Image: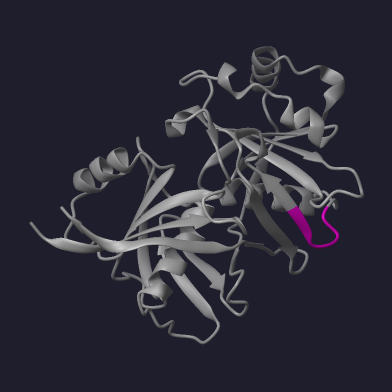
Amino acid sequence: MPTRRFIQCDVFTPQPTLGNALAVVVDGDGMTEQEMQRLAAWTNLAETTFMLPPADPRADYRLRIFSPVREMPFAGHPTLGSCAAWLHCGGQPRQAGRVLQECGIGIVEIDIGNPTQPAFTAPPTRIRAMSDENRAAICAELDIAADKILDTAELDNGPVFQALQLDCAASVLALDSSRVRWPAFKSIGFIGAHSPDAECQYEVRHLAPSSGMSEDPITGSLNAALAHWMQVEGRLPQAVSVAQGTAIGRHGRVAIDPVDRHNVKIGGQTHILIDGEITL
């Protein structure tokens, strides 16, 4: 059986083991989709990625991303973590200072100018009104009072999120994630503002029963979608810091930087914790 380079890293945290873990098969060439999905179920992490030669001549590498139950067209922490793993293993970008990743949604640009906190350019987000049915079901299941909700939307940047902005971070942290179950609920994102003197400006949670867990520790794709939503509505005038994972004992930190009226960068730290080989 072939041996492949295997990395396990921790993404979106300044403190190793308190972020979102990611498994990376650095050389996934020749693996079948069934083999990839089986390994992702075995690692039992939020995502496992497989690096392949690019099909698009612009790209530095191609990435396939799997949760324990399905393949994903894009995800944020696998993007930053896989990029860090690729660089750690000697990858050299075609253009200095940026890596171009090919994945299910196309090309994603990763700015590596700041080596301690790389940032990907958030892919476009389709913003739609959340249906009255979805809003009512989410509020009933999680016991959210109507006066706690400031805004809602359905956000799609590959993954699709039912997004709710609540009145404050405390309301976000008070939610009981164990109350949502697949298949009635798939992917729900919450954001609420902290007090002005807090370390981070916002608290985010991602209740994701469809991924095989009740709550995702730190979610780059959700933060990217929320950032675009806030930007379109004029609520993101400057760079902000987001905390995520607090309710489940993680110390996730996501940097959101609005580059211009249409583009946002999503950054965070990655730590390589395991560097070895896997026999498949």
Figure check: 142 above or below 73: above
Whether residue 195 appears in magenta in the rendering, the answer is no
The x and y percentages for residue 183 are 46, 20
Q: Residue at x 87, y 21 (%)?
A: 147
> Viewed as shown, does residue 241 lie left or right of 208?
right
Q: Residue at x 7, y 56 (%)?
A: 1
Whether residue 240 appears in magenta in the rendering, the answer is yes
Figure check: 147 above or below 274: above
- The reply to whether residue 31 is visible in this rendering is yes
The x and y percentages for residue 234 are 85, 53
Figure check: 134 above or below 246: above
Give the extent of the magenta segment.
236-241
Q: Residue at x 80, y 31 (%)?
A: 170
- The one nearer the camera, 43 or 234, is 43
> Viewed as shown, does residue 259 lie left or right of 5?
right
Q: Residue at x 66, y 44 (%)?
A: 244
- The one nearer the camera, 259 or 179, is 179
> Viewed as shown, does residue 255 lie left or right of 42?
right
